[in-house]
Image: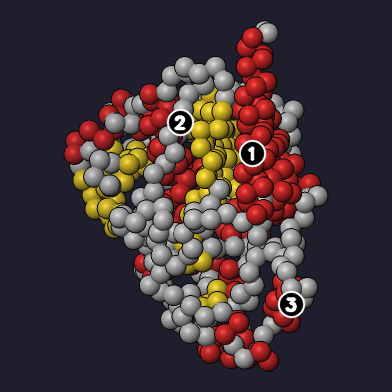
């Protein structure tokens, strides 16, 4: 059986003791229906195919120890899958498939996925499924109904990792996502984006998301989260919105505490610590020093000057800690742009680091498209490999990114960590099972734009704008109810 077919007829579900369960039809695998993973299990068990169960004890979500058990030992877990098996979702702006991987692991079935970027579509098709389409996503696109719409419109227009461009056409895709949700009216939606989404264009993009969905009747949580608080081995601040059509969804509670980033411990102080870089990279073989292995575990060749810089960096240090004569020219330009007039520019981008040696005993800084060119291994004098970046993003080792090296680096850096996606999917599945549409009007249930104690003037201005927008949408919805 090919690796591609094996993934199509394999199911992974969360077992009751924190284990993951995998069932594989062992007989005539070619006869298994090429459907969602959960449906494959039911087809196999009802038709009494010879099956074997693989229990994976998972101390961390990115690799597994394996042990075999007979079929009758795992049948109770199959029964637990029946409710989530019917939940379907549509994946808009699907990218490499980080959201899809998390939702699939929680038993959701994807009915349609789309993205305009060929490398993203090829990656999704190779790892998640052939239901993906390469298409320009617009608000008049004909897509099927599903229980949940998920998506993260392209973020670079307001990403803190680069220059901020308020007029970037990609930013309008936030409103496209909201329009598709409002028009097709799924039972729930999940939106994910970078933290710069909150203050980009002085809050316009937040309004682009909230205004259409609140008017359509969605009751929404909009919060900034740190992926480390959900089990990712990196401090990755993201904005997540979860909305229910006429009902109040829960927002997933943090599962881990973390340290090493402002406000990261405020979200969850009494929980287990987030995984560290050392834990994330544990078990990987020594990287290749050339060629192009399929798993992307290749160490980049360094010039003598780059090696000198790396050898001087101690864990936790960045380019700023090096002698100034060793700074990159690009680093000097970014540093000067932030301070040349005494006030950081609105278009300054993120804090420059140039090179950064990670600490083995803490979560990583956020993985970006540039991580494999800037992040230094915590104990070895080399840059991270793309596979190590994917590990820190919590992608399994069998997940292979497609396209050029630049494409693969961007796909890895832009992806939603599957462990975060899985936490969202698990919480949403529980909410959907008990959801009842009892509210006629949409509203903003919660708005948590920061994990810190205070707010900047720019963020406070956005909070005021959001309050006015939601009040106006509430008022218009009430008028429509009074005057049908």
Q: Quadrant of residue 220?
A: top right
Pointer 2 residue:
249
Pointer 1 residue:
466
Q: Is residue 356 above or below residue 137?
A: below
| Res 462 seen here | yes
Q: Is residue 172 above or below residue 458?
A: above
Q: Is residue 175 above or below residue 20?
A: above
Q: For marks 2 and 1, give the one nearer the viewer.
A: 1
Viewer-proximal residue, 91 or 231?
A: 231
Structural distance between the alpha carbons of marks 2 and 1: 20 Å
Which residue is pictured at 72% across the width and 48% down the height? 202
**Where is residue 227 shown, x and y percent of the image?**
47, 54
Seen as rendered, the residue at the extreme right is 167
**Where is residue 210 shown, x and y percent of the image?**
63, 34
- Coloring scheme of the render? secondary structure
Q: For marks 1 and 3, give the one nearer the viewer.
A: 1
Viewer-proximal residue, 352 or 104?
A: 352
């Amino acid at each position: 059986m090919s690796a591609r077919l094996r993934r199509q007829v394999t199911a992974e579900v969360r077992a009751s003791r924190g284990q993951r369960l995998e069932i594989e039809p062992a007989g005539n695998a070619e006869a298994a229906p090429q459907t969602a993973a959960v449906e494959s299990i039911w087809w196999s068990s009802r038709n009494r195919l010879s099956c074997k169960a693989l229990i994976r004890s998972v101390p961390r979500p990115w690799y597994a120890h394996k042990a075999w058990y007979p079929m009758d030992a795992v049948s109770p877990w199959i029964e637990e899958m029946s409710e989530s098996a019917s939940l379907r979702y549509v994946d808009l702006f699907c990218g490499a498939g980080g959201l899809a991987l998390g939702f699939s692991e929680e038993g959701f079935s994807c009915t349609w996925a789309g993205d305009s970027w060929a490398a993203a579509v090829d990656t999704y098709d190779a790892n998640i499924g052939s239901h993906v389409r390469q298409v320009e996503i617009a608000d008049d696109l004909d897509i099927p109904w599903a229980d949940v719409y998920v998506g993260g419109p392209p973020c670079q227009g307001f990403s803190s990792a680069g220059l901020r461009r308020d007029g970037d056409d990609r930013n309008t895709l936030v409103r496209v996502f909201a329009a598709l949700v409002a028009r097709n009216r799924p039972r729930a939606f999940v939106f994910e984006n970078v933290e710069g989404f909150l203050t980009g264009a002085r809050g316009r993009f937040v309004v682009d998301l909230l205004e259409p969905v609140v008017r359509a009747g969605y009751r929404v949580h909009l919060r900034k989260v740190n992926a480390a608080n959900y089990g990712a081995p990196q401090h990755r601040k993201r904005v997540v919105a979860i909305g229910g059509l006429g009902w109040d969804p829960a927002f997933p509670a943090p599962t881990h505490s973390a340290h090493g980033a402002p406000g990261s411990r405020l979200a969850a102080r009494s929980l287990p610590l987030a995984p560290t870089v050392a834990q994330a990279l544990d078990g990987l073989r020594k990287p290749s020093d050339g060629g192009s292995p399929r798993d992307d575990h290749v160490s980049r060749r360094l010039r003598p000057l780059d090696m000198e810089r790396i050898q001087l960096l101690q864990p936790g240090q960045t380019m700023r800690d090096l002698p100034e004569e060793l700074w990159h020219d690009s680093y000097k330009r970014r540093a000067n742009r932030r301070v040349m007039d005494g006030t950081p520019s609105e278009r300054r981008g993120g804090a420059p680091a140039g090179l950064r040696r990670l600490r083995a005993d803490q979560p990583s800084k956020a993985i970006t498209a540039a991580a494999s060119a800037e992040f230094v291994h915590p104990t070895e004098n080399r840059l991270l490999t793309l596979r190590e970046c994917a590990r820190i993003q919590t992608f399994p080792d069998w997940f292979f990114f497609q396209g050029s090296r630049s494409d693969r680096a961007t796909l890895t850096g832009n992806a939603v960590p599957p462990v975060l996606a899985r936490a969202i999917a698990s919480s949403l599945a529980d909410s959907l099972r008990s959801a009842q549409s009892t509210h006629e009007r949409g509203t903003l249930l919660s708005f948590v734009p920061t994990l810190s104690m205070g707010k900047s003037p720019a963020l406070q201005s956005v909070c005021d704008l959001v309050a006015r927008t939601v009040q106006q949408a509430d008022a218009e919805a009430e008028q429509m109810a009074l005057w049908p």
